[in-house]
Amino acid sequence: MSAPMEVTLQDPPNDEISLQNGVELQFTNPSPLISEEKVLVSVEVCLKPSSTARIEDVRSAVERMLEKRSLSYNDGPIPVPLDDAFLAENVQRISICDTDEWANNHNVLLFWQVKPVVQVFQLSEEGPCEDVSADGQPSSFNEWVLPAKEFDGMWESLIYESGLKQRLLRYAASALLFTEKGVDPFLVSWNRIVLLHGPPGTGKTSLCKALAQKLSIRFNSRYPQCLLVEVNAHSLFSKWFSESGKLVAKLFQKIQEMVEEENNLVFVLIDEVESLAAARKAALSGAEPSDSIRVVNALLTQIDKLKSSPNVMILTTSNITAAIDIAFVDRADIKAYVGPPTLQARYEILRSCLQELIRTQILLSPQDCRNFILPNYASLKERLKAPDVDEASIPIQLCKQLLETAEACEGMSGRSLRKLPFLAHASLANPFDSDPTKFLCTMIETAKRERSEL
Ligand code: ADP
């Protein structure tokens, strides 16, 4: 699939349209002013685990369904039509994905501005296949068949600003497309190496896994089988370097077998890649046994070899932002700094946490309704600016308090933010107190405590 086209969108012809996905809109005739070019929008269709339907049949059925309906396109689920027995039997959920960029700029995309690109997939429930060594050595890699149940929803749960996720997805998708189309690397050069770097806990590892999952869905017609191999660089360089040599050989033999099948798309994730550079430095300085340098070099040579295979993407993360002394990441085409969340991202992360506690009834919904939705950052700002804002309304009060909490969390990582609601709950005087206002007060105190311990 190609990345969405850059087109200028017209204003929707009717301002009063409901922005809910799945809502039938009032008009059916596209405005004559509309540009011929359409925005490609991903519509992901997740099959039920029990479904044995052919992907092409489901895709056609969903395309027909979308043609019949006049939808607004913003991220979120579309109800599976119950009057379509085939879809109702086979489809678990349908969702519109990755329109954020457009939605931010234009609020919403309407059906006549959009060309839906339907991607049908079934989650693998196999779980990680761990490489267990008989001699008590820590395992050196984990392997998943993608898209995996474990990574479902991970992409959506990671919140960054300024289109970082979209940029990554487009880069990676272009790199795979160039490969698929056989672009001559001597004429146009690119590689399939991604390096995400930044402070710990900012979601780099999760983002790599979520990116692999996304790409496995997007490219499933070209690559019916996708695999993710997570290399545990630390355990490779455990105490016994002589053993490590064997582990490296075994690991790459396995990866090579996967890569030889040209219908496989293989993602190799190397976390904390700087540990390879550190290991090499230690080996060179003589602090490690003499054969250690051979092991590190063997690993780097293997990665270099792997790089040239068209159906491999190497995903790496690093907690240090300074240049890393490893040639293969040095040349990474896709390098992205992943920093601590900004105020808006912190608000959105905490909003999703609060929403989950309301859904599970640990907290009481302000309007006594489990489906209560707290406004997002952009619409909260809009509402607060409006002259007729009812400052006393409970949802507005709650959102303002949430914003205060997000402000109190400055400098905290995404990982710490996702733990905060749990820590706050554990320090409530009465754990069955489900008042969200009191809960947010405790969360601010907990955040202050956590920050003082940073
Ligand atoms: P890193 O590899 O940078 O150390 P991880 O991928 O291990 O970070 O992040 C741990 C967890 O922290 C993630 O699974 C996620 O729940 C949470 N997290 C981190 N950053 C974010 C973010 N920007 N948005 C949402 N959740 C985040």
Image (tube, helix red, strand yellow):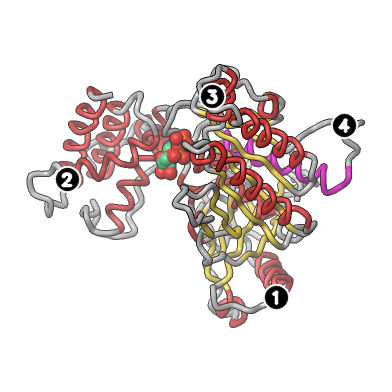
Residue shown at the point (91%, 38%) measured from the top left: 184
Using the rendered image of the protein, determine whether residue 224 is visible from the camera's viewpoint: yes
Q: Does 113 lie within the magenta span?
A: no
Q: Label 1 neighbourhood size at 10 Å, few (<14), some (14-19), many (20+)?
A: few
Q: Earlier in the sequence, mark 2 or mark 1?
A: 1
Q: Are marks 3 and 4 in contact (CB under 8 Å)?
A: no
Q: Read off the residue under disc 4.
A: 188
x and y percentages locating residue 35 in the rendered image: 77, 43
Q: Read off the residue under disc 1.
A: 54
Q: Does 168 lie within the magenta span?
A: yes
Secondary structure of residue under mark 4: loop
Q: CA distance from mark 2 to mark 1?
A: 48 Å
Side (left or right) of 75 relative to 446: right
Q: Earlier in the sequence, mark 3 or mark 4?
A: 4
Q: Read off the residue under disc 2.
A: 426
**Which amino acid does the dot numbered 3 rest on?**
Ala
Instruction: Indicate the quadrant where residue 351 lies.
Output: top left
Write the start and end of the magenta stretch as one range.
164-182
Q: Earlier in the sequence, mark 1 or mark 3?
A: 1
Q: Read off the residue under disc 3.
A: 278
> The C terminus lies in which quarter of the figure?
top left
Looking at this view, is 314 or 396 the one in front? 314
Secondary structure of residue under mark 1: loop
Using the rendered image of the protein, determine whether residue 378 is visible from the camera's viewpoint: no
